[in-house]
Image: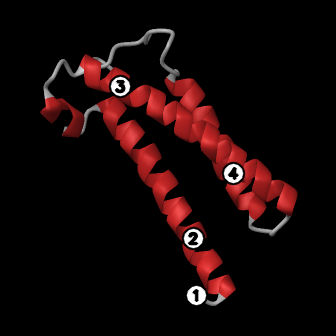
């Protein structure tokens, strides 16, 4: 499945398991924060920041592994598909959260 981005990855790069765990934790915190509990909102924001750091750490590694072949970064490769899916889900969740906040505030 990960033939183009072989495992194990270098130790400086977060593993798929770490990224998946961070995303799952963020997703759970996001849904919990919908209750408007300020402590849950702080936790959600903290977990979102942690997930963002992990994704930013992963991106340069994928670029290096692609060996300058920019097209490899846009093909539907297994790891890229996974990362793109995570990124898309995070962006959509943040967008939905922004829309909900705007409607709540009357913007």
What is the CA distance from the residue labelled 4 to the residue labelled 1?
Answer: 22 Å
What is the CA distance from the residue labelled 2 to the residue labelled 4?
Answer: 13 Å
How crowded pointer 3 is (Cα within 10 Å; few <14, some 14-19, many 20+) is rated as: few
Mark 1 sits on what residue?
Answer: 107
What is the CA distance from the residue labelled 4 to the residue labelled 3?
Answer: 24 Å
Q: Is residue 99 above or below residue 53?
A: below
Q: Earlier in the sequence, mark 3 or mark 2?
A: 3
Q: Secondary structure at mark 1?
A: loop
Q: Earlier in the sequence, mark 2 or mark 1?
A: 2
What is the CA distance from the residue labelled 2 to the residue labelled 1?
Answer: 11 Å
Look at 55% across and 31% down and name the residue there. Answer: 19
Q: Is residue 51 above or below residue 7?
A: below
Mark 2 sits on what residue?
Answer: 98
Q: Is residue 98 above or below residue 90?
A: below
Q: Secondary structure at mark 2?
A: helix
Q: Is residue 62 above or below residue 23?
A: above
């Amino acid at each position: 499945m990960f033939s183009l981005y072989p495992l194990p990855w270098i130790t400086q790069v977060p593993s798929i398991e770490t990224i998946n765990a961070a995303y799952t934790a963020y997703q759970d915190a996001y849904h919990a924060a919908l209750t408007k509990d300020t402590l849950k909102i702080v936790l959600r924001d903290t977990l979102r920041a942690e997930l963002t750091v992990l994704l930013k750490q992963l991106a340069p590694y994928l670029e290096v592994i692609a060996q300058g072949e920019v097209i490899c970064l846009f093909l539907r490769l297994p790891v890229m598909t996974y990362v793109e899916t995570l990124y898309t889900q995070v962006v959509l969740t943040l967008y939905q959260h922004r829309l909900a906040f705007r409607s709540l505030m009357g913007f």
